[in-house]
Amino acid sequence: MSNVRFVGLDVHAETIAVAVAEREGDVRSLGVIPNRAEAIRQVMKKLGPPEQLRVCYEAGPTGYVVYWQLAKLGVACEVVAPTLVPTRAGDRVKTDRRDAVKLARNYRAGELTPVWVPDASHEALRDLVRAREAAKRDLARARHRFVKYLLRRGRRPPTAMRAWTTRYRQWAETVRFELAAQEATRLDYWHEVAHGVERLARLERAIDEIIATAPAAMRAVIEALQALRGLAKVSAVTIVAELGQVSRFAHPRQLMGYCGVVASEHSSGERTRRGGITRTGNAHLRRVVVESAWAYRHPPTLGPTLRRRQVGLDPAVLEIAWKAQHRLCTRYRRLIERGKSQQQVVTAIGRELLGFIWAIASRVETVHPNASTAA
């Protein structure tokens, strides 16, 4: 189409800078508009028919609201990865208008990388999973404050016991202080712990309810991923929520790069220099995978919990999961024997675990084409 216009939007909470690039011609700024649905509709109407517009903006804290507003108007829009937007060396001037112009120019040149945009229900599931992750972090901080407060005041259990076991909680509830200020502090810290426990349990019940009412295709992927050692329900739900359709990655190496667990590289001429992992991409997914990788430091086995998770699953999926145990455990031992640090080894195991996750999810999604669609 010869009359296509490429539009770049620099989206902020209250304003949007707009720039347009003709298919052949200069790129010009159209100014700044309020970040409101009506303002977006008006500027798109001025730019021309929806079928002639190609709009892009960077992923950020404003989410995908603008994307869905443009979709309702029939305008093609892509959300692009901000870290992959090309930059000019020596460019030290940054404004909203210049950013919008740069987006429009690069979009016309085909130099921007779009990100996957979840549908509304899938995004809601991801928000719920991330809320549970935040609640778990907050609970850990509340417990840490409580324990350290007792330590500063010289209060220790009468016998050796692990923190936050049933015995420890029973003992902690009996601790009292004579000074009113100290007792008020103890009560505040203890109430934060109790609130954190209740909050985490409430979110986990909500996740269970969402999964119970999800389409059979999505449940199939979640159940299949739990065949892997170290991937229980919450971890499997997190992977599905963060990735959506896993088979959209043509090769597991693409998934590894998306997760940011591939080695960084800075090579020039005859010198090849590789460093630590890139840590780009989805940090939530990377955390879950690396945590799950710790399970593969143990010899291959099928415990009662893992057996229950594998009941009724596709034999091909079970074969992949069993192969993962043997390969990853062997890989772990060999890397340890070579003198690698345990954290480096677990990260490497997590990278390979992503390959098995890709194999299982892709197989299930082949049988259930709508496996990435949430309720």
Image: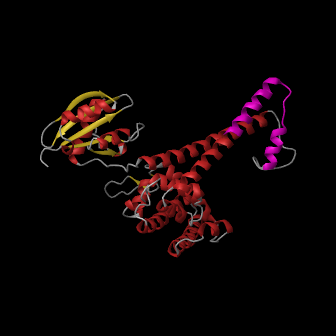
State left or right for residue 177 relative to residue 64: right
Q: Is 13 situated left or right of 166 in this image?
A: left
Residue 245 found in image quarter: bottom left
- Residue at 33% x, 33% y is 37
Res 313 → quadrant: bottom right
Q: Residue furthest top?
A: 180
Residue 29 seen anywhere in this rendered image of the structure: yes
Q: Foreground: 360 or 268? A: 360
Residue pictured at 86% horizontal, 27% vertical: 178
The one of 91 and 85 positioned closer to us in this rendering:
85
Question: Majority secondary structure of the magenta segment?
Answer: helix
Q: What range of the chain is rendered magenta? A: 166-195
> How has the structure been colored for display?
secondary structure
Is 20 inside the magenta-drawn segment? no
The answer to whether one can see residue 343 in this image is no
For this view, does 151 lie left or right of residue 123?
right
Judge by depth and name the residue closer to the eye, 347 or 23: 23
Q: Is residue 342 left or right of residue 178?
A: left
- How far across and down, in percent of the image, does residue 215 sit? 48, 58
Where is residue 259 shown, x and y percent of the image? 45, 54
Q: Which of 10 and 366 is in front in this view?
A: 366
